[in-house]
Image (cartoon, helix red, strand yellow):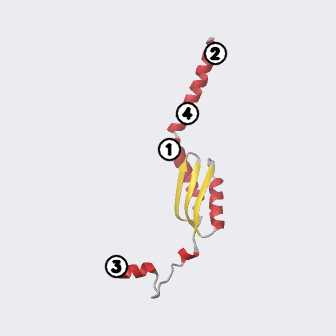
Amino acid sequence: MKILFALIAGILSCFFLAYYGAQTRRGVIQEDLWNRAANALVNAPVERLVITADGREITLRGIVPDEQAKQDAARSVERTSGVHGVTNLLEIRSAQAANPPVGSEGQNPAARCQQEIT
């Protein structure tokens, strides 16, 4: 009976220590993964990049020029040590966003609005 009690107490202690260690280091681990993901994307053509770390899961947001750049960015982060999964929410820049529409007076709407305010 004493051996069974000691075994159960030992198992419960191990679970408690593992849980406590994971919770106290969670912020440090997430910050480290965020830094690793950011370093993996240093040369990636991503505008307005936002990286979110939740545990070992990384979420990417931003704007990329094409589908290939989107996939390359996700693969770069997936290969990063410690990353368990990547949610790729990068958006592809549309041709319309790159070339704003021109109004009837030859100006784009933003410039026309600024001119009216001025």
Mark 1–mark 2 Cα distance, whole angstroms, equals 37 Å
Mark 1–mark 4 Cα distance, whole angstroms, equals 14 Å
Label 3 amino acid? Ile
Q: Residue furthest left?
A: 118
How far across and down, in percent of the image, does residue 66 sit? 63, 69
Q: Are marks 1 and 2 in contact (CB under 8 Å)?
A: no
Indicate which disc residue 27 carries: 1
Mark 1 / mark 4, whichever is N-terminal: 4
Label 1 amino acid? Gly
Indicate which disc residue 4 carries: 2
Mark 3 / mark 4, whichever is N-terminal: 4
Mark 2 / mark 4, whichever is N-terminal: 2
Mark 3–mark 2 Cα distance, whole angstroms, equals 80 Å
Residue mark closest to the camera, 1 vs 4 = 4
Depicted 83 relative to depicted 115: above or below: above
Which residue corresponds to mark 3?
117
The image quarter in which residue 89 lies: bottom right
Which residue corresponds to mark 4?
19
Q: Classify the position of the N terminus by image quarter.
A: top right
Q: Are marks 3 and 2 in contact (CB under 8 Å)?
A: no
Mark 2–mark 4 Cα distance, whole angstroms, equals 23 Å
Q: For mark 4, does the 10 Å Cα neighbourhood hold few (<14), some (14 to 19), or many (20 or more) residues?
A: few
Mark 1 / mark 2, whichever is N-terminal: 2
- Which element is circle 3 on? helix
How far across and down, in percent of the image, does residue 118 sit? 33, 81
The image quarter in which residue 55 lies: top right
- Which element is circle 4 on? helix
Label 4 amino acid? Tyr
How far across and down, in percent of the image, does residue 44 sit? 59, 64
Residue mark closest to the camera, 1 vs 2 = 2
